[in-house]
Structures are given as structure tokens and as C-alpha cells.
Image (cartoon, grey):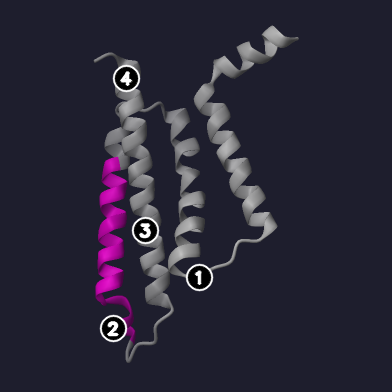
Amino acid sequence: MNNDSMAAIFSCVFLGSVFISSVSQILLKKSADKTYDSRLKEYLNPLVIIAYGMFFCSMLITMYCYKYVDVSAGPILESAGYIFVGVLGYFFLHEKFNSKKIIGMLLILLGILIFSLGGEIFNFFSSIF
């Protein structure tokens, strides 16, 4: 496999890692919404332990993906986490979408799309003008 296909594959793996991290954030929020008898139970309950375990695995996957994914692409791919958390929050935390959230998510998607297309989008616009 050439470097471009490896980068594409590991970019998808990177996005999967971002999704895992987003799920762990939802689990932490679910845990924070509960009331506990003691401080120890608040931090040592199954949701918190699973969430931090998922976050740790996500971090390891992300670090491995950087072997194949350009460092400049990392923050762009990480920004998908805002979309994942927003959508997961809607379904599992029953959070509402307002116009600002929707516009923000669309702008994030647009930024990811522009970055993903790279020079192709500039070639397209330069051919028009």
C-alpha cells in the first residue's frame, strides 16, 4: 500500500478514536448527573472507570495513527469530536439543538471538508476565475 492509502485508512481510524473519546465524554457526563453517597463512589463507579479506560484507549489509538496521519491533519480530525459529542448529547442526554449549535457544527463540517479536499478545492475555484 502506498502512503496516501495508508493515510486515508488511518485517518478513518483516527476518526474512530475521536468517536470513542466522544462516547467517553458522554459517559462522564451521565456519571456527573448522578448523586453519590460519598466522594469515593463518585470517582470509582463503573461509568467513570469505563469512560477513562475508553479515553485512554482512544489516546493510544490516536498516537499510533500519527505514524501515518499528517500532524497538521490531527487537529482537523479532532474537531469532529465536537460534532460527535453534540449528536450523542442529543440522543443520550436529551440536549436540544439551537441555531448556534447547528451553525457551529456546519462550519466545523465545512472546515473538515475544505481541509480534506486540500488543493483540489483551490484548483476548482481557480479554474472558474
Give residue 56's position: percent from left, percent from top. 28, 54
Q: Amino acid at mark 3?
A: Val
Classified by dominant secondary structure, the portion drawn in magenta counts as helix
**In this view, the mark in front (1 or 3):** 1
x 26%, y 45%: residue:
60
Sequence-wise, the earlier of marks 2 and 3 is: 3
Q: Amino acid at mark 4?
A: Ser
The reply to whether the C-beta atoms of the residues labelled 2 and 1 are less than 8 Å apart is no
Name the secondary structure under disc 1: loop
Q: Nearer the viewer, residue 93 or 58?
A: 93
Cα separation, mark 2 vs mark 1, equals 25 Å
For the record, the magenta segment spans 39-61
Q: Which badge, 3 or 4, is on the more N-terminal residue?
A: 4
| Residue 31 x %, y % | 37, 75
Q: CA distance from mark 2 to mark 4?
A: 46 Å
The foreground one among 126 and 38 is 126
Q: Is residue 9 magenta?
A: no
Q: Nearer the viewer, mark 2 or mark 3?
A: 3
Q: Which residue carries the number 4 mark?
A: 5
Which disc is residue 41 wearing? 2
The mark that comes first in sequence, 2 or 4, is 4
Q: Residues within 10 Å of mark 2 (few under 14, many from 20)?
A: few
- Which mark identifies residue 23? 3
Regarding mark 3 in the picture, which secondary structure is present there?
helix
Q: Residue at x 63, y 49 (%)?
A: 104
Q: Disc 4 or 1, which lies upstream in sequence?
A: 4
Distance from label 1 to label 3 (Cα)? 15 Å
**How far is disc 2 from disc 3 in space, using C-alphas?**
21 Å
